[in-house]
Image (tube, helix red, strand yellow):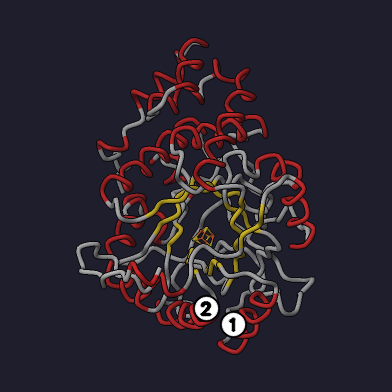
């Protein structure tokens, strides 16, 4: 198969040139810019911006508070299955890993959902590997229906689907889809994805658009930092988000910043990203996409998460397990997709947030709001002003 070329809207070359040549004067202008775009993002990721983390963080914090208040929205992942036909070299669930495989039964899904609801979560992310007979569309649909009965927001991070499949999931109560491109550079992408459906770069790249065409309220994007040149991946991630926000302006986009973690298989990051660079990346995205939710998971250390909460980051997971199930009955021998770094309890994490004057928020909207038709042209009932 020939290496795919990037679509015109995803061409990073002009911005990589900007990142390579930016001056400290350009950095000061980018931090102060009122309508930053790809040029400013590239400048803020340049070597010249390295000494400017503090002013970037101050502006990122101010913008985060302006758009999200003093809050951090919390969510929890639930791995439904670790069966996978894929051969992603960086993943503990790849088909050639010798690990116990299982998919939660319907009764187990019910019991895991009940355990998570009891912990107070109202937003849940359901995960599987690639499509297999153990975890296909019908399996995900059934899990979404169950989750939608007890959670306000149900999102999925499963296998890329067709528009009609996303439409069925949206009708079942799924509100969002997360699909990381991992790396936006086609050649390393081809090497890192040894076999399986994920090897198709373009099919994966277009999956978030298909999800929005299918009626999802939002999509989550990300690149797995450490796999390739982080400046290229960050610029393309920004261009991808900007493209979707322009094309599907009624929908939402969120962005995650996963860093490669130890996993079964022992793959190590060819292009590691250190804490200072990741912090600058998050601040740069906040400056250039001020009202887009930015997420940080328990892949990161408690110290790093504490530092970034409210400083760019507006949404975080906590209490996460990357094994299949495990919230109701912990299995000490289960192998996760990757190692979790922040294993604090929900209480300990919320205490930390409150100490920073940040309020943990367990939901985004009421169920009634979800029934609001997506078509803004639909006539609404008149509001009885006198009754207000
Ligand atoms: S990243 Fe996803 S598709 Fe790739 S091996 Fe892991 S679970 Fe399978």
| Mark 1 neighbour density, 10 Å: few (under 14) some (14–19) many (20 or more) | many
Q: Position of residue 110 (x, y in %)?
A: 59, 85
Q: Position of residue 124 (x, y in %)?
A: 56, 68
Q: Mark 1 sits on what residue?
A: 109
Q: Which element type, helix, strand or loop, lies under badge 2?
A: helix
CA gap, disc 2 and disc 1: 9 Å
In the displayed structure image, the side of residue 3 where residue 359 appears, left or right: right
Instruction: Tell me the residue at 52%/55% (across/down).
Output: 88
Q: Residue furthest bottom?
A: 107
Q: Mark 2 sits on what residue?
A: 147
Total marks in image: 2
Q: Which element type, helix, strand or loop, lies under badge 1?
A: helix
In the depicted structure, whether residue 51 falls above or below residue 234: above
Q: Which mark is residue 207?
A: none
Quarter of the image holding residue 240? Answer: top left
Q: Position of residue 175 (x, y in %)?
A: 42, 67
Quarter of the image holding residue 213? Answer: bottom left
In the displayed structure image, the side of residue 168 where residue 302 appears, left or right: right
Instruction: Tell me the residue at 33%/76% (across/down).
Output: 168
Question: Camera-side residue: 352 or 274?
Answer: 352
Instruction: Tell me the residue at 61%/47% (across/down).
Output: 70
Callout 2: CB less than 8 Å from ligand 1: no
CB under 8 Å between callouts 2 and 1?
yes
The C terminus: image quadrant: bottom left
Which of discs 2 and 1 lies nearer the camera? The answer is 2
Q: Residue furthest front?
A: 386
Quarter of the image holding residue 349? Answer: bottom right
């Amino acid at each position: 198969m020939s290496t795919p070329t990037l679509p015109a809207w995803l061409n990073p070359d002009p911005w990589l040139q900007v990142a390579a040549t930016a001056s400290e004067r350009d950095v000061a202008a980018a931090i102060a810019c009122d309508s930053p775009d790809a040029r400013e993002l590239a400048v803020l990721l340049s070597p010249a911006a390295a000494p400017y983390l503090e002013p970037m963080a101050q502006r990122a914090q101010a913008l985060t508070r302006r758009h999200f208040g003093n809050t951090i929205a919390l969510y929890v992942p639930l791995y439904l299955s670790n069966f996978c036909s894929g051969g992603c070299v960086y993943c503990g669930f790849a088909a050639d890993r010798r690990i116990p495989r299982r998919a939660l039964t319907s009764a187990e899904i019910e019991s895991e959902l009940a355990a998570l609801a009891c912990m107070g979560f109202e937003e849940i992310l359901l995960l599987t590997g690639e499509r297999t007979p153990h975890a296909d569309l019908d399996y995900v649909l059934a899990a979404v229906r169950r989750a939608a009965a007890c959670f306000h927001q149900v999102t999925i991070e499963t296998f890329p689907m067709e528009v009609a499949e996303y439409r069925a999931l949206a009708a079942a109560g799924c509100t969002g889809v997360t699909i990381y491109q991992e790396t936006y550079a086609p050649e390393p992408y081809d090497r890192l994805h040894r076999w399986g459906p994920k090897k198709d770069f373009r099919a994966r790249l277009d999956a978030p658009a298909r999800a929005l065409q299918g009626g999802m309220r939002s999509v989550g994007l990300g690149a797995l930092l450490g796999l390739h040149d982080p400046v290229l991946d960050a610029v393309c991630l920004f261009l991808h988000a900007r493209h979707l926000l322009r094309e599907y302006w009624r929908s939402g986009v969120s962005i995650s910043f996963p860093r490669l973690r130890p996993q079964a298989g022992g793959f190590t990051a060819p292009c590691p990203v250190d804490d200072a660079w990741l912090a600058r990346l998050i601040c740069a995205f906040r400056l250039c996409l001020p009202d887009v939710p930015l997420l940080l998971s328990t892949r990161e250390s408690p110290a790093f998460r504490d530092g970034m909460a409210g400083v760019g980051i507006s949404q975080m997971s906590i209490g996460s397990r990357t094994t299949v199930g495990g919230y109701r009955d912990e299995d000490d021998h289960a192998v996760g997709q990757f190692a979790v770094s922040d294993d604090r309890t929900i209480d300990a994490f919320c205490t930390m947030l409150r100490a920073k004057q940040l309020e943990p928020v367990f939901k985004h909207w009421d169920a009634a709001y979800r029934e609001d038709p997506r078509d803004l042209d639909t006539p609404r009932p008149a509001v009885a002003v006198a009754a207000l």
